[in-house]
Image: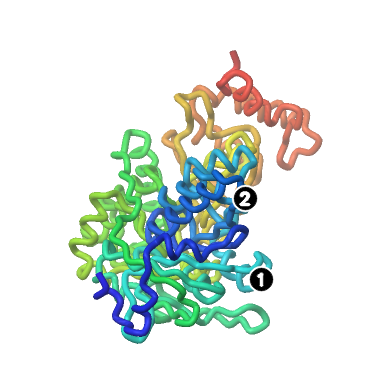
Amino acid sequence: MTDRIACAALRSRISDADTAAALIRPGETVAASGFTGSGYPKAVPQALARRIAAAHAEGQPFRVNLWTGASTGPELDGALAAVDGIAQRLPYSGDPVAREKINRGEIDYLDMHLSQVAPMAWEGVLGTLDTAIIEVSGIRADGSLIPSSSVGNNKTWADRATRVILEVNRWQDAALEGMHDIYYGTRLPPARVPIPLVRPDDRIGTPYLACDPDKIVAIVETDAPDRNLPFAAPDDTARAIAGHIIEFLTHEVSRGRLPAALLPIQSGVGNIANAVLSGLIDAPFDPMTAYTEVIQDGMLDLLDAGKLRMASATAFSLSPQAAARLNANMAAYRDRMILRPQEISNHPELVRRLGCIAMNGLIEADIYGNVNSTLVMGSRIQNGIGGSGDFARNAYVSIFMTPSTAKGGKISAIVPQAAHVDHIMQDVQVIVTEQGLADLRGLSPRQRARLVIERCAHPDYRPLLADYAMRAEGGAYGLHAPSLPGEALSWHQRFMQTGTMLPS
C-alpha cells in the first residue's frame, strides 16, 4: 500500500492505528475529516475507542471533544459514542448512538451552520484544536495531500491542529486526484476579501491540501469503504413532491423568472431530496448545474443522462451501487465534479451571488412558514441544521419539502406553531408536501396561513388548522400573525401524552 505515500520523508511515520491513537490524550479536542458518511477516518477512531473503553474499565476518565465537517460513520461517531468517549460534539451528528446520548444530556452538542465552523475555528472561540485525524487518498512526493471523497473542514483542521494523523485509504479511487479545489484565500475581518468565484464550475484553488510536515505525527494505511447507505425507491409521496416542484420550476421559467436551464441547484440529503433530483431527469431543463453540499445518487443520474453539466459540492453521499458506479468511472466524472471546502461550498456570499435554488427537508412547518429542521417536539435533536440555513437565507428561491404527515399519520408536518424555529418565515419562500405547493413569496402571514393550510396540510389535519387560524384571528393579541399562546403547542403536547396529534 505504501505506493500511495510518495513522499519519502514521511514514510518513516507510517504506524498502526493503535500506535497513532495512543498519541491522543484524555480531554483533548480531536477534529476528524468526514462529511455525510464519506471521507472520514475509519481505523484510528476505532483504536481510540478501544483505548477509551480500556481506560473506563480501569475507572479512569477518558473523553474527547469531537469536531468534523458533518456526519461521519459508525467507525467514528458510533464507535466513540458507544464507549462514552465524546464530551462535546460539533457541528452536526447523524449517528443514532450519539443522537440518543445527546438527547439524554450525556454529550454536549453544538449544532452549527456548516459555513460558520471554519471561521469560528480560526477566530479561536471554539478553543484549541489538539489533534486532527484526516483521511486522504494519497500523499504526493512534495508532501501535499490528495483529498479523498469529502473535503469538509479538512483544510482548517490541517492548519489549526497541533498534531495531524493521516489515514491513507486505498479504497478511495486514485482517479479522485484532480477533482478537488482547495481555496486558501479566506481571511478573517478586516483582511477579508471577496471570493473570486462567479460560476459553479470556476476553479479558484489547488487540487491538494497543504500540511506542515512537522505536524504529521503518524500515517496509517487503510483499505475501508465509506458508509454508503441505500436510498429508498421513490414512493407515491416522493414522486408527488417532485412533481409539484418541477411544475413550479417550469412555471417560473415560463414567467421569465428563471432561465431555461435553471440556476444552480442545491439539494439537501435524503430520500425525498434524491427523488426530486431523479425527477429532474425528465424535466425540460438542461444543461443544469449544481452548487450544493453533497453529490447524491440522483445527481449522478442527472450527470449520466446529460441533464447536469457539472456539480460542485464538498462530499459524496451515495448508495453502495452508486459509489461502485462512481469508482468504476471516476476518470470520466472527474472533470464534471468539483469538491471544495465546506466554507466555500456553503458560503453565503457565493450562494447569493450564484442565485442557488435551495431545496431542503424539514421536520415541521407552521402555518406562517416558520420551519423547524432540527428538534422533534421542540427538544429532541434529530441531526442538526447542517447547511440548510446557509442556503435558505441566501438562495434565489428557497424551497422546503416534506411528507404532510409522519408516524403513520399521527404527526402533522404542518402545525399551528413550530415547536422550534431554525428558519424564520422571512427565509422560507416555498413549502411543498405531497398534497401541494404553497408559493409564499409576497404574502403576509395571514395570507400565508390560508395557502399553507389549503395546499400543504393533510386532509385529516386541514379542518383543525383552519379552525385554529379562524379562532386565532378572532382572539389573538395582535392580528399580524395571529397566535393563541395557550393552544399553539397543544398538538405537540397531545402527541407526547397520547401518541398522536389528532384529538381523540
Residue at image mark 1: 124
Q: Quadrant of residue 145?
A: bottom left
> Which residue extends farthest right?
477
* Residue in the image at 38% along x and 57% along y: 42
> Which residue extends farthest left?
328
Residue at image mark 2: 61
Q: Position of residue 339 (x, y in %)?
A: 38, 68
Mark-to-mark CA distance, 1 and 2 = 26 Å
Q: Amino acid at mark 2?
A: Pro
Q: Earlier in the sequence, mark 1 or mark 2?
A: 2
* Residue in the image at 25% along x and 66% along y: 173
For numbered disc 2, what is the local secondary structure?
loop
Placement of the C terminus among the 4 image quadrants: top right
> Which one is nearer the viewer's eye here, 13 or 76?
13
> Which one is nearer the viewer's eye here, 187 or 268?
187
Q: Are marks 1 and 2 in contact (CB under 8 Å)?
A: no
Relative vertical location of residue 226 with respect to residue 338 in this rendering, above or below: above
Placement of the N terminus among the 4 image quadrants: bottom left
* Residue in the image at 58% along x and 64% along y: 117
> Which residue extends farthest top?
504
* Residue in the image at 19% along x and 64% along y: 329
Residue density around tag 1, few if under 14, some if 14–19, many if 20 or more, within 10 Å: few
Q: Amino acid at mark 1?
A: Gly
> Which one is nearer the viewer's eye here, 251 or 111?
111
Q: Position of residue 22 (x, y in %)?
A: 49, 62
Residue mark closest to the camera, 1 vs 2:
2
> Which one is nearer the viewer's eye here, 324 or 394?
324
Q: How many marks?
A: 2
Q: Is residue 318 visible?
A: yes
Q: Is residue 140 left or right of residue 110?
A: left
Q: Position of residue 364 (x, y in %)?
A: 55, 38
